[in-house]
Image (cartoon, helix red, strand yellow):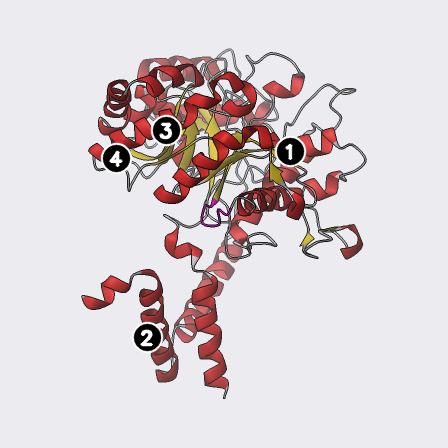
Amino acid sequence: MGNSILTLLLIHTIFFNYYYCISSEPSFVGVNIGTDVSNLLSPSHLLSFLQFHKITQIRIYDANPEILTALSHTNISVIITLPNNQLLAIASSNTTAATWIYRNVVAYYPQTLISAISVGDEVLTTVPSSAPLILPAIQSLYSALVASNLHQHVKISTPHAASVILEPFPPSQAYFNQTLLPYILPLLQFLSRTGSPLMMNLYPYYVVVERKGVIPVDNALFKPLTPDKEMVDPNTLLHYENVLDAMVDAAYFSMKNLNVTDVVVLVTESGWPSKGDAKEEPYATKDNADTYNSNLIKHVFDHSGTPLHPEITSSVYIYELFNEDLKSPPVSEANWGLFHGNTTPAYLLHVSGIGSFMANDTTNQTYCIAMDGFDSKMLQAALDWACGPGQANCSEIQPGQSCYQPNNVKNHASYAFDSYFQIQAKTPGSCDFKGAAMITTTDPSHGSCIFPGSKKVSKKTKQMVNSTKSTSDGDKLRITTFSSFKISVVNNILHIFLAVCFPTLLLVI
């Protein structure tokens, strides 16, 4: 009886997660990278920064050739963008569209993992006069992808603002703005035919701001709520613990009203500003930004889906990687980044142990080290300044001292930079050195060389860790010992999975 129940549960799990079969990959967290930043990192330094923080999904607002080249032969996937001001040219000429695809996709793929093309950005709401151009532009670009045999690898869509959906709360009553239906319905039909996602820019922050007093900020921040504080859809009785899930489900209900049920929502932008005008933007604080983005990351990696679709977890691109300090007011516009332009964290993000994204949790001990690949002469100049006018303690990198080896400028500069960084109490801007330095949460200490920001681990603690590791290894061996019944069940479930997702593959096996 118990074995039968287990089998049924496993079968149910396979069908319950059917959407994973038709999705190109499991849900993930990515970041948007804007360029209105003073002293923006060079593409090579940006790559090092992304790799260090385990960021493998990015979205850029153009098709910057230097960035696409830098991403070559890495595991970082990128959504590129056709800017709004190029819509007319692409929509008007298949030749122009083919040229654009050749220059910005074919020239780089597959060495550079271009995952999708964003055709414009919030066109229906920001430049409504260009609305008739969206689908023709998308179709022209898609035809060029087909001609290059890349249409199965590179998806194509266009991001929408949340405002294209009216009456989003409760979600079951949501519907697309009727005046936009001549553009949205054929677009959705195209997305359905091509297996492309509905791209949505969803900001619970703006929901709180616009519905002040109606939507509690705790609902927007993913904070644990008592049942009486959860949003309940009176039509479906679904309970919503956070605003983002409600916004995503509003999109699904809106599509369902148009008889489109097989298009997945991709959240191309979501985030929270860490600073704003004290009077006009009271919700734009570091604490709220930390809470929202930390909980957002956890929510995606929980793979819990939404109340309407628990089997589908939308991937999310956080807006954004760096504060764009060159942007115009209001104050919040320049403060959406996870980091300042000099790579110093804008606030302390709490994501330790949650997936691989941002594995170097910014709440951990932080150090300042030399940037990989930086010009050695410029690095030497920065080292000389740190040990001279900067008054860093450089005694340990002198000949014969514990941090002298390896005897190279990068190692010595890292120690000097960290000394200066710690002396300055890790204040913003103290780990810059004209772009030669970067923040890390990985202790750079090695051997007998202990960096200034490090906390020594006693031998006793190390022994305890080793002992615990040995015990854990033993547990792993016991856990991975399967009974013959379990192996049989797994084999059966594997065949069910293949039958559901890859029926033709069974003919080969």
Residue under numbered circle 2: 491
User: Can you give x and y, in whole percent of width and height, for residue 479 in the image?
Assistant: 43, 73
**Label 4 environment density (alpha carbons within 10 Å; few <14, some 14–19, many ≥20):** few
Q: Earlier in the sequence, mark 3 or mark 2?
A: 3
User: Residue at 31% of width from left, 37% of height from top?
Assistant: 154
Q: Earlier in the sequence, mark 3 or mark 1?
A: 3
Label number found at residue 9: none
Q: Earlier in the sequence, mark 4 or mark 3?
A: 4
Residue under numbered circle 1: 289
Residue under numbered circle 4: 73
Whether tag 3 and tag 2 are in contact, CB under 8 A, the answer is no
**Up-down relation of residue 434 to residue 120 (above or below):** above
Q: CA distance from mark 3 to mark 1?
A: 34 Å
User: Can you give x and y, in whole percent of width and height, for residue 501 in the image?
Assistant: 34, 61
Closer to the camera, 434 or 410? Answer: 434
Q: What range is drawn magenta here?
A: 259-264
Q: Earlier in the sequence, mark 1 or mark 4?
A: 4
Viewer-side label of 4, 2: 2
Q: Is residue 79 magenta?
A: no
Q: Secondary structure of the magenta portion, mostly? A: loop
Q: CA distance from mark 3 to mark 2?
A: 43 Å
Residue under numbered circle 3: 138
Viewer-side label of 2, 1: 2
Amino acid at circle 4: His
Amino acid at circle 2: Asn
Q: What secondary structure is found at the residue carrying circle 2?
A: helix
Q: CA distance from mark 2 to mark 1?
A: 45 Å
Q: What secondary structure is found at the residue carrying circle 3?
A: helix
The quarter of the displayed image where residue 466 is located: bottom left
User: Can you give x and y, in whole percent of width and height, for residue 475 in the image?
Assistant: 45, 71
Closer to the camera, 72 or 238? Answer: 238
